[in-house]
Image (cartoon, grey):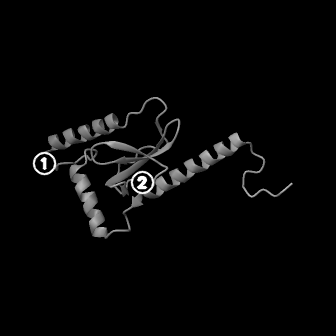
Amino acid sequence: MPERSDNYGDLTPHHRRENTISNNKKLLIKQFEENCGQFIIMGNDVVRFIGIAEDYMDYYYVTYDGRKLNWHSAVGSYTVLKGKIDEKDYNHLIHVAKLNHFDQDDFFSPSTEEEKEKRKLFAISHKLEISKVSGYDKYIVPLHWELN
């Protein structure tokens, strides 16, 4: 019998597929842990990487653009910005997000305590509303809303 060149040994095709899926999931979680909350380039957009999700067919990078969540197939890739652009420019992205992203407690710079409380409640409500899933959809990791 010839030597096997793969690492699957005597696994059946079904078990090989399950093993590959498990390894992919671990890799995606590792990528997320390294880059969670950071600004990335996904397609043509600068967005925040806030989660990993799955449905019955695929895994997804979950991003946030300040208003809505987007699920991007993990078959694609993204570009990390932190450490690749000037720190001053990256910090400006964080500053703008703190002022304008709906998930931030102090977006639009509230001036009174009453306004701050309203914005905080709005941010909580906003995150709950946009992160609802149904059917086979689920998040693999908790969504990471903190800016990083």
Image point (24%, 58%), residue name: 95
In screen coordinates, is 67 left or right of 25? left
Q: Secondary structure at mark 2?
A: loop
Q: Residues within 10 Å of mark 2 (few under 14, many from 20)?
A: many
| Farthest bottom residue in view | 86
Picture quarter with the C terminus? bottom left
Picture quarter with the N terminus? bottom right
Image point (33%, 37%), residue name: 130
Image point (15%, 40%), residue name: 114
Q: Which one is in front, 99 or 73?
A: 73
Q: What's the residue type where badge 2 is placed?
A: Cys
Marked residue nearer the N-terminal end (1 or 2):
2
The CA span between labels 1 and 2 is: 30 Å
Q: Which mark is residue 36?
A: 2
- Height in image: 20 above or below 38? above
x, y (%) of residue 57? Answer: 53, 38
Q: Which mark is residue 111?
A: 1
Mark 1 or mark 2, whichever is nearer to me: 2
Q: What's the residue type where badge 1 is placed?
A: Ser
x, y (%) of residue 32? Answer: 47, 53
Q: Secondary structure at mark 1?
A: loop
| Farthest front residue in view | 2
Q: Residues within 10 Å of mark 1 (few under 14, many from 20)?
A: few
x, y (%) of residue 133? Answer: 41, 33
Q: Which one is in front, 7 or 128?
A: 7
In screen coordinates, is 145 left or right of 24? left
Q: Which quarter of the picture shows residue 38?
A: bottom left
Q: Which quarter of the picture shows residue 85?
A: bottom left
- Height in image: 118 above or below 37? above
Image point (37%, 64%), residue name: 82
